Amino acid sequence: MVGIVMMVALALLVTKLGQATDQKSKVQSAADAAALAGAQEIRKEVPQLVLTAIHDRFANPFVYDPCGMGRAQAMDFAGRAGTDVTTYCYHPDTDTVQVSVESTSVSVSGQKAKADAEARVGTTVGDCAVLTPKPATPAPTATIIRRPPPTTQPPPTTQPGPVAVSCGGLSLDIVFDGATGDILAPSSSDILDMFKPGLKS
């Protein structure tokens, strides 16, 4: 009789431990998914922030607190997995999205399971600064000089050469429109290709 009671107690203990391990694993997966979702969203937003900062001559692309970037997506993914985000922040200078989550339900141990995760956006982003200007390509010279016919159109605007700009880990060759000052290259999608999100190990 004592042996049967011991076996039943052991079976219950193993079952509870299995459930606790399973819940912890699910909560860790939720934290990982939340961190990756935040990083993916940030990856979409940062290129335009960088281009705007360069165009408007701001040093820092983050005119507001970057801890809010990607947070809604992280919360959405955590919620789908039955967890709540307890802390979240994007640190552009270290290329880190940090997320902490806890389960919405109490585990067999009587506590909520918790987990942390870190993801990377793909590169550090910091203050933008002009590096060394690249020399402009000289215009070709003609061998025969002829007087051009009169025209009413203004002469074409020459484009200055690319300007090397660094924004943390991003190194960009920026081409400005000589007439308007608008950025001609790179585009947001060109910058987007520089980011490779993933979980930090």
Image: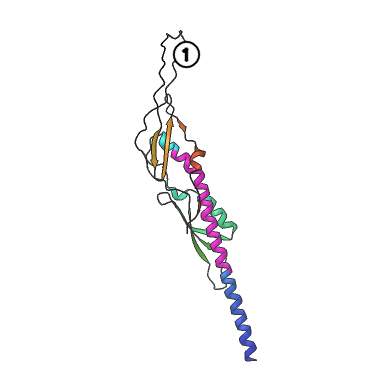
* Whether residue 201 is situated above or below residue 68 in the rendered picture: below
Q: Amino acid at mark 1?
A: Gln
* Whether residue 77 is situated above or below residue 126 in the rendered picture: below
Picture residue at 65% right of the left edge, 88% below the top: 4
**Residue 52 seen from this side:** yes
For the stretch drawn in magenta, what is the main secondary structure? helix
Q: Residue tagged by mark 1?
A: 153
Q: Nearer the viewer, residue 107 or 148?
A: 148
Q: Is 3 on the left or on the right of 96, as rendered?
A: right
Q: x%, y% of residue 48? A: 48, 39
Question: Is disc 1 placed on a helix, strand or loop?
Answer: loop
**Residue 107 seen from this side:** no
Q: x%, y% of residue 106? A: 56, 68
**Residue at the extreme bottom:** 1
Mark 1, Cα crowd under 10 Å, few <14 / some 14-19 / many 20+, is: few
**What segment is highlighted magenta in the picture?**
22-50
Q: Is 88 on the left or on the right of 3, as rendered?
A: left
Picture residue at 51% right of the left edge, 65% below the top: 114
